[in-house]
Structure formats: C-alpha cells, structure tokens
Image (spheres, rainbow, N blue to C red):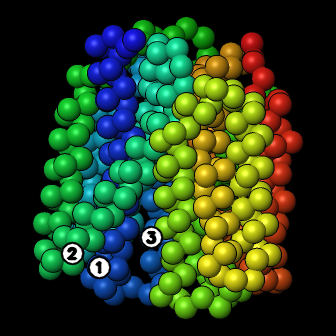
Amino acid sequence: MSSPDQRAAKLATRLGFFVAGFGLAGWAPLVPFAKQHLAVDDATLGLLLLCLGIGSVAAMLLTGVLSARFGSKPIIITSGLGLAAMLPLLSVAATPATLGTALFAFGAALGSLDVAVNIHAIEVERAEGRPLMSGFHAQFSIGGFAGSGLMTLLLAMQVDALVSAVLCSCLMGAAMVLAAPRLLRASPQQAGPLIVIPHGFVVLLAALAGVMFLVEGAMLDWGALLLAGTKHLPETQAGIGYILFSIAMTAGRLGGDAVVSRIGDRAALFWGSSIAIAGFVVLLTVPVAALAMTGFLLIGIGASNLVPILFRRAGTQTRMPIELAVAAVTMVGYAGVLLGPAAIGFVAEFTSLQTAFWMLAALLTIVPLSAHRAGAAQT
C-alpha cells in the first residue's frame, strides 16, 4: 500500500503531465486568432509554429543536465508556471517576431516540463515498485482534451482570446501550486559527467520513441486526409478517425499499468506494436470507411503503452545518467513529431499518401523486432 508521501507524489506527477497536455492543447484553438491578428500567410504561420518545436528541443538536453544536478522538482515547478504564464502572451503578440519569440519560450517551458516530469515519474514508479508510467502519460492526453475543450468553449462563447487564455492559465497555475509541495525533494548533486553521448541501449530506446512519436504525429496531421482521399469520406467527418485514435490511446494508457504488470515490458512492446501494425493494415486495405476507421482504434490501443514503457526502460538502464537518457529519448521523440509529418508529405507528393502510410507501417515493424532487446534488463 502506498504511503501518504507516495500518494502525494503520484498526484503531483499526474498534475504535471496534465498541465503539459492542457497547455499545449490550449494553444491550438488560438492559432486561427493569431493568424488573423497578425495577417500572415500559411507559410509564415508554419515558420512561426516551428519556433515552438525548436524551443522544446533546445530546452530538453539542458533540462536533463539541470535535473541531474538539482533534481526534477525545481524544473517542474519553474517550467509548469512558465508554461502557464506564456499562454496569455501568445494571444496578444502584436508582430510575427513577438509571436515567434513567445512560441520559442512557450516551447522551451513545454520541453523542460516534459523531460522533468518523466524523470519524476520514473522516481515515483521506482518508489512504488510497480508500473505507473502509462497512467501518468494518460493524464497528458486528458489534459489535452480538457485544454482544447475549455479554450474552444470559451472562444465559442465569444469570450475574448486574452481573457480565455488567462482563465486557462490560472487553472494551470493552480494545478502547479497544488503539485509543488507534493513533488519529491530534489536529489543531491551527482558526481561524474553531466554530458554523456547516448549510445547502445539508450540509442535504441530513442530510435523506437522517434518511430512512435512519428506514428502519433501522422495520425494527427494526415489521418483525416487519408480517410477523405482513399475512403471518400466527407471532409467534415474525416476527423472522426483521429478522435477514435485519441480515445483508444487514452483508454489504453488508463488501463495499461495493469496490463504491463501482468505481462511485462517485453511482451507489452511486442504485442502492442503488433496490434498497431494490424491497425495500419485494416486502415489501408478495408475499402469501407466505417470499417476502416477501426484501424484507428487498433493503432491507438496498440501504441498507447509503448512510449511509457520506453521511458521506464530509460529509467532502468545504468549506461548513462537517467536524466540524460530521458532527455535523449524525449528529444528524438519530438524530432519524430516535428520532422515526420513533413517527411510523410514529401513521400506522398512523389508517390501517394497511402504509400507513405504503408512505409510508416513498415517502419513500425522495428518495434516488435526490437522488443526482446528493448525489454531486456540493462546493467
């Protein structure tokens, strides 16, 4: 049975993941307002949005170093409050340069929070002595639903964009204030190098994370277009596929810790990725749209616990400091999100979107083929 301190630390970890998902998703409904306010074209907007990703990746390695030196607690508090503070600024940026700078800072806070809260989750899971990572990651998805839903609701009610952002920011700040005293105390300063080039097992985990984040990014950016183009589904209904994917992934993570406790990391990696591959086959081969969309369910449920397992494996290896291993896995994962959708578009331009998705399914086979190695104990 968990002690009061352990229960408090679990709550704080869930709140950290929730705030990360809430903040990121809360920005999405503001994008059209920012474009209209700045009167920029799609190309300029795309470059501005890239600033968020660049800020995230730039902060991740530094976060690993700082967490190794000072512990994850101060990083979670600082980055979580920073994320909350930056959201309103995104709604009032008056020039493209101002918005780009704000997005870079917003992304840096998000990237720092993502790395630090995963490090904290590993520490909490180790203290509890049982899998908890899937449930923690589910809170990111739940936060995403809540953030996008609340912001969209406020804007639909004709609430000013700045006021809407401030209200969401206050909720994020309150969550961080609630979490702060419950976070595990910062670990003492570590001896040894704080910069270690990832190699071997950590490189494998990072590569697998990149594949899985690429799958998630493809579902978000290209799933609706695939349904509209190959299944002749009306564009107004094509987004249903991603909704099914998101629901399945969240549900899979909420129940994932119990499954992983029963079958272990190695089997969960193998069978989860195999189910996701089967989902791609259904999605790409079944001609009836309503049936093909079950592929999104299979991909979501199959992929749901793979990234949490990879983070846990980064926390069990001893080849390099855990904080830097988590930062490396996170950085490569984000690279998959940032570069993957663009690569899919490039392939689709010269072949077809369906061919690009078949290539994605083929890439996903790396995960079951690597499950034995990735799920093995490392010393």
Residue 54 image point, x, y percent: 52, 56
Q: Residues within 10 Å of mark 2 (few under 14, many from 20)?
A: some
Front residue of 346 and 184? 184
Residue 56 image point, x, y percent: 48, 50
Count of marks, rendered view: 3
Pointer 3: what residue? 48
Q: CA distance from mark 1 to mark 3?
A: 14 Å
Tell me, yes or no, whether the two marked residues, 1 and 2, touch with CB atoms within 8 Å.
yes
Q: Determine whether 16 is above or below 313 in the image.
A: below
Q: Earlier in the sequence, mark 3 or mark 2?
A: 3
Give me the residue at 77% from left, 57% from top: 277
> What type is the residue that disc 2 sits on?
Leu
Q: Determine whether 91 is above or below 33 in the image.
A: above
Pointer 2: what residue? 155
Q: CA distance from mark 1 to mark 2?
A: 10 Å
Residue 297 image point, x, y percent: 61, 61
At mark 3, the secondary structure is helix
